[in-house]
Image (cartoon, rainbow, N blue to C red):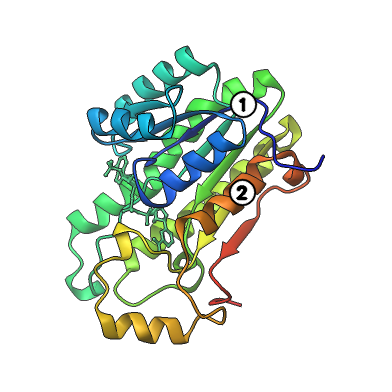
Amino acid sequence: MTQCDLESRHALVTGGTRGIGLAVARRLHASGAKVSLTGRDSANAEDVAATIADDVLGLGCDVRDGGQIATAFRTAAERHGPIEILVNNAGVARDNLMIRLSEEEWEEVMQANLRGAFHTIRLVLKGMMKAGGGRIINITSVVGMTGNKGQANYAASKAGLIGLSKSVAKEYASRNILVNCVAPGFIETDMTAALPGGAREALLGGIPLGRLGQPDDVASAVLFLASDFASYMTGQVLVVDGGMVM
Ligand code: NDP
């Protein structure tokens, strides 16, 4: 084995329309996977999929809605076969100090970041068991490990995702279903674009590698966990943060 060859396995990436998810979808496709990606708007998801390659499937699916997830996953399986690699990447941040955090902000983040993964994982397990194995990769955050001011809802959802991943990893290790997390630090995407200049400089000072992360940095870690190179890893959190948390 000299390279990560995904050998036409079907990989589904939630939130694959931009940022980290799009980089992951591109990288998995370039490594030989059949790829399905989702976003909230189906026309946009189709357009983005077409920018990667004609055989990439773009699907509309709001991960806050279990019914929409089930429909999208059925369509994906009809097109590319059972899902063998699931990347739970879709996520949102609605930051606020705890004292001002509304129930709506709490719920939205929990539903998108944590409950969405509950639905997607339940949907793929049977097929993976039948196939004799599979990979589930959940995009959490270093904030889920350290906490962060103004991000109680986001940090709780990402810490929850780690607990969910480790539990499912234990339940299905005997079925060769490997469940791992990738925890990015600060990656330059739409999600982090709003940061004011001063805060950006302060943040950079805390990153030993001296630069902000790029979506491709995270995609590399996801590809590794999806590949045969990671066949003896499960229940782990792979941190991709330029050394910010150590
Ligand atoms: P972006 O905001 O750039 O992209 C978010 C993606 O998620 C889009 O594709 C969006 O698709 C999709 N999405 C958002 N809400 C929903 C929803 N309800 N249903 C379905 N899809 C949805 O974010 P990033 O690329 O920065 O982040 C990707 C993941 O990485 C997230 O889980 C995030 O928490 C995590 N992360 C990011 C970090 C960073 O520094 N950027 C650091 C640590 C973790 P669309 O708009 O088309 O619906």
Measured in 3D between alpha carbons, the distance from the residue under mark 1 to the one under mark 2, in whole angstroms, is 18 Å
Residue in the picture at 61% in, 48% down: 180
Residue in the picture at 72% in, 23% down: 132
Q: Which residue is mark 2?
A: 180
Q: Quadrant of the C terminus?
A: bottom right
Give me the disc on residue 9.
1
The correct choice, above or below, for 143 with respect to 92 in the image is below
**Mark closest to the chain's N terminus, 1 or 2:** 1
The correct choice, above or below, for 214 with respect to 177 in the image is below
The correct choice, above or below, for 27 with respect to 51 in the image is below
Q: Quadrant of the N terminus?
A: top right
Query: What residue type is disc 1 on?
Result: Arg
- Residue 84: tell me if it is visible: yes
- Residue 233 left/right relative to 85: right
- Residue 21 left/right relative to 153: right
- In front: label 1 or label 2: 1
- Residue 68 left/right relative to 212: left
